[in-house]
Amino acid sequence: MAYEIKEKIKICQKLRFNHIEVGIDNLEDWNYLYQNKDELIKNDISIGIHMPMELNTCDPIKMANEFWLDYFHENYKKGKILNVRYYNLHLGYGLKNKVKNNRIGYLNNTINFLLKLLNNIDDVGIYIENTYSKNGDLINLGNKASDFEYLFKNVTQYNLGFCYDTGHNLINKDDYLNRLSDNIRLVHLSDNDGSEDLHLGFSENGLLTKKDIEEILEIKNNKYLVFEMNTKYLNESFDLYKKISKK
């Protein structure tokens, strides 16, 4: 999150990372980044922005959908000061029965959202992320590879990409790597127990296997690899990653 930026810069210095993905909830959160702009530049650290989970690209309420577009554009204007490289989004959510009966309609709402968004933005990446859903009263879109295949078929702007989240895939599995390999521009690396999105590091005996990481390293068009995990797991995870990447 933005208020943690000083700590994350120090971690980048220690591990020689050169990119941070920052969670932004409120517009005021940008002040944390502005206050550390010089340190980010000094350490040659690029910034990506993870937009809030509440942002709902598939919202069927037109006025609400327009609000989310306006909210995004306000963040985009603030991000230009820091040369933000991309904005990462979840597709959004809807009432279970409504989505079940009209999933394509909800995806069409996302298509309209993305087309309006991309019509005015061509200098940064817009990445859409797989998630998971536990079949409650509100369910998430974007927990199936077919959702993204439909979106990329209908929205063809070059700066729209896919964010592959390994932890989300462990909860709602699908063949994202094969079916969306050409679209992947960003990867979130974390492990969990297959039920909860715990943001664990990866290890020799985790659900996220060496083979999984090897396949991720083979993605041709990926630009960013984010260790989206609790800080205490970083050293062990990075050591294992280096061993795998050398092979």
Image (cartoon, helix red, strand yellow):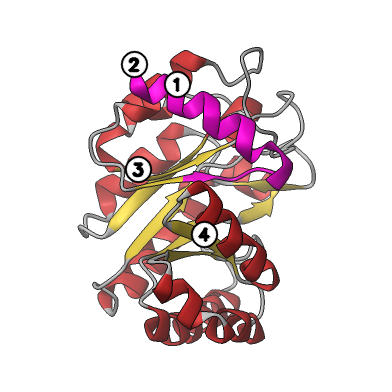
Front disc: 2 or 4? 2
Badge 4 marks a residue whose secondary structure is strand
| Amino acid beneath label 3 | Tyr
Residue, disc 4: 21
Q: Can you identify the residue that label 2 sits on? A: 247
Q: Is residue 166 left or right of residue 17?
A: right
Which residue is label 1 attached to?
243
Q: Secondary structure at mark 1?
A: helix
> Is the N terminus in the top left, top right, bottom left or bottom right quadrant?
bottom right
Residues shaded magenta? 226-247
Q: Is residue 242 magenta?
A: yes
Quarter of the image holding residue 35? bottom right
Q: Earlier in the sequence, mark 3 or mark 1?
A: 3
Query: Which circle's residue, 2 or 4, is located before the other in the chain?
Result: 4
Closest to the observer, 242 or 182: 242
In the picture of the structure, the residue carrying the numbered disc 3 is 150
Question: Is residue 241 left or right of 9 when viewed as pictured?
Answer: left
